[in-house]
Image (tube, rainbow, N blue to C red):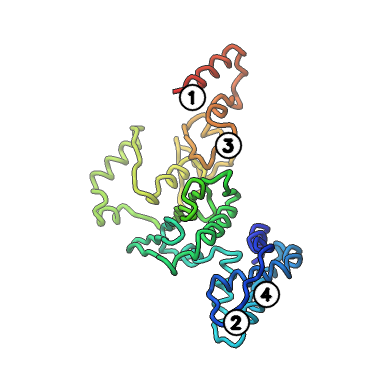
Amino acid sequence: MSISSYEFLSIVQAQDEAAVEATAHMDYQSLLESVRASIAQNHADELAAALNDVGATAELKSLILKYTTALLSGQDFDRESLTEKIYQDMAGLGLLTPYLHDPTVEEININGYETVEIIRPSGTTFLYGAEAFASPNAALDVIKRMVRMGGMLLDAQTPRVDSYIGSGTRISAIIPPLVPQEHGVVVSIRKQVKSRLTREQMIEAGTATSDMLDFLATCICYGVSIGVAGGTGSGKSTLLYNISGIDRATSGTVQFLDQRIDRMSEEELSALRLHRMGFVFQDINLQKKPVFAGQYPLPRPDEKPRSQTGTARQSKRIDDADGH
């Protein structure tokens, strides 16, 4: 494992802060800031040189252990677990790490830094107070780091972001000024649960009857329009993304108009969506600029240029619509 430039920036953000003086009863947050400040002040150049190097993580953990041992001199503590916790809070995803790797967790909601909701099929667990984030800034640091993993930036200029961070995990985050500063963040993290639900399981659970499923299959076979509804995380977007070829199914086959979607190239899929399928993208797939009125008039690749008069009329209609 290596550390990225984003993780490096998270580490050295405390470079200008003075290290907190160690005491015999140092709390965890003070210890974290002291270790981070010491590493930022004394080893920033070394870490910068080791960016994306496979040995960088081990080197960082070694430095964490070195300064932690010095600050807690004479005290008994679990070196391995404390080093890992500090590492996760400095360059990882903090308290969220075990839940993101837990296959039974479907969703994580953060309603301010002091309240974290962990949702599993078996029930919901809440983390409050000391079990949650230590401060608004601590929550903000972790969420910004997580959003960067999806190639997005979360800051005062872009305080609301939707991002995918691999393995089907989607994060929607809002930060100040859209939420009160004292709360830090409001976040929804939804994980794609890799399980197959069979017809028999749906009938057994009472989700649907055999007649219902047969009726839906008949509608689809004969081209009858249907709507897909469901709760958060139930798979609506995943279903549509697989049908359209935006996401690739890991097993089985996907057919649309007697064509194997799962065998098509990206170019073929783009042409299919352009000519045979209407697909309205979620905002995470839209351009940041221009806004809607600027995206709408973009010509299709196979479309002939419109006359100046036609373009002007279209622009006027859009301007009129924006005024309503």
Neighbor class of circle 2 (other Cα within 10 Å; few <14, some 14-19, many 20+) is some
Quadrant containing the N terminus is: bottom right
Write down the residue under mark 3: 287
Asked if the residue at tag 4 contacts the one at tag 1, i.e. Cβ–Cβ closer than 8 Å, the answer is: no
Q: Are there few (<14), some (14-19), or many (20+) residues within 10 Å of tag 1?
A: few
The residue most toward the top is 309
Q: Which percent across, then down, holds residue 234?
A: 37, 50
Q: Marks 3 and 1, Cα distance to the nearest angstrom?
A: 18 Å
Secondary structure under the numbered disc 2 in the rendered image:
loop
Q: Earlier in the sequence, mark 4 or mark 3?
A: 4
Left or right of 129? Residue 2 is right
Q: Distance between the Cα atoms at labels 1 and 4? A: 56 Å
Marks 2 and 3, the one that precedes in the sequence: 2
**Precedes in sequence: disc 2 or disc 1:** 2
Q: CA distance from mark 4 to mark 3?
A: 42 Å
Q: Marks 2 and 3, how far apart in space?
A: 50 Å
The kind of residue on which mark 3 rests is: Gln
- Of tags 2 and 3, the one toward the viewer is 2
Task: Mark yes or no: residue 117 visible.
Answer: yes
Rendered residue at 34%/61% (across/down)? 121
For disc 4, the marked residue is 63
Nearest the eye: 292 or 217: 292
Q: Secondary structure at mark 3?
A: loop
- Which numbered disc, 4 or 2, marks the residue closer to the eye? 2
Label 2, on which residue? 72
Residue shown at 73% from the left, 65% from the top: 44
**In the image shown, does 140 or 299 lie closer to the viewer?**
140
Residue marked by disc 1: 322
Picture coordinates of residue 273, whole percent (x, y): 51, 34
Q: Is label 1 in a helix, a strand or a loop?
A: helix
